[in-house]
Image (cartoon, grey):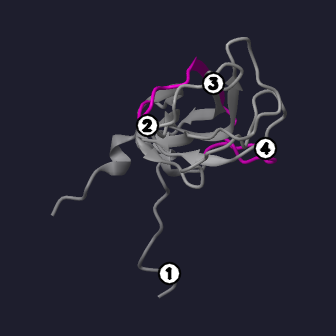
């Protein structure tokens, strides 16, 4: 025989690679997200949600940076790196995000050109930045009284999750 008995079928449009940037690999139609928030230091055993970003169904994304803020009642406490009694966590779908599962100090200070990260966010993920008080007493004057957090990244529509035909199961 002069040919193969098996012929390759073309992949549906949704399974073909998305048009991506040749430099960074992100889809060309990606959009930025930038969420931030502030709050008082939570009471002992309590936590406060600092920032939250929720991807819609059929959308994926990437976390590119996060920042931490600490301040007294007057404003930023410049140079403070240790946050005794406070646990900072990044969570995806309510689960701690490795390697940021147990930060007890400032690793990316707000406004200081922090270290970028590149962490893929799966379809419809919810990203949260929280700080929890590990039973530390109320802060004395001149100490940490306010906390803040910021999340930045990009997100895009992923047709792989939106095309019903690519998820259909074969009939038996």
- State the extent of the magenta-drawn residues as a range: 18-46
Residue at image mark 1: 3
Query: Which mark identifies residue 148?
Result: 3
Is residue 128 visible in the rendered image? The answer is: no
Residue topped by disc 2 = 124
Q: Residue at x 59, y 49 (%)?
A: 100
Q: Where residue 69 sits: x, y (%)? A: 69, 27
Q: From mark 3 to mark 2, how far is it between C-alphas?
A: 25 Å
Q: Are marks 4 and 3 in contact (CB under 8 Å)?
A: no
Q: In the displayed image of the protein, which residue is found farthest to the top?
A: 74
Q: Is residue 162 above or below residue 39?
A: below
Q: How far is mark 4 from mark 1, CA to CA? A: 55 Å
Contact, mark 1 vs mark 3 (Cβ under 8 Å): no
Q: Secondary structure at mark 4?
A: loop
- Residue located 54% across and 42% down the image: 89
First in residue order: circle 1 vs circle 3: 1
Find residue 120 and report its horizontal and vertical position in percent.
Answer: 58, 48
Mark sitting earlier along the chain (3/2) = 2
SS category of the residue bearing label 3:
strand
Mark 1 against mark 3, which lies toward the viewer? Answer: 3
The residue mark sitting in front, 3 or 2, is 3
Residue 116 in which image quadrant: top right
Residue where numbered disc 4 is placed: 115
Label located before the other in sequence (4 or 3): 4
Tell which circle, 1 or 2, labels the residue nearer the N-terminal end: 1
Distance of label 4 from label 3 (alpha carbons): 17 Å
Examine the rendered structure and indicate whether residue 157 appears above or below residue 15: above
Which secondary structure dominates the residues rendered in magenta? loop
Does the residue at mark 1 contact the one at mark 2 (Cβ under 8 Å)?
no
Residue that extends furthest to the bottom in the rendered view of this protein: 1
């Amino acid at each position: 025989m002069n040919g193969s008995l098996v012929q390759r079928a073309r992949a549906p449009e949704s399974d073909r690679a998305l048009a991506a940037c040749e430099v960074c690999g992100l889809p060309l139609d990606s959009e930025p997200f930038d969420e931030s928030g502030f709050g008082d230091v939570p009471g002992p055993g309590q936590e406060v949600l600092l920032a939250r970003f929720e991807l819609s169904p059929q959308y994926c994304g990437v976390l590119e940076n996060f920042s931490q803020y600490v301040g007294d009642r007057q404003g930023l406490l410049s140079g403070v790196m240790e946050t005794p009694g406070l646990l900072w966590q990044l969570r995806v779908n309510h689960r701690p995000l490795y390697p940021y599962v147990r930060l007890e100090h400032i690793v990316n200070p707000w406004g200081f050109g922090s270290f970028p990260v590149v962490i893929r966010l799966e379809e419809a993920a919810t990203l949260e930045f929280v700080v929890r008080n590990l039973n530390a007493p109320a802060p004395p004057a001149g100490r940490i009284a306010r906390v803040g957090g910021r999340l930045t990244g990009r997100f895009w529509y992923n047709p792989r999750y939106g095309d019903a035909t690519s998820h259909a199961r074969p009939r038996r």
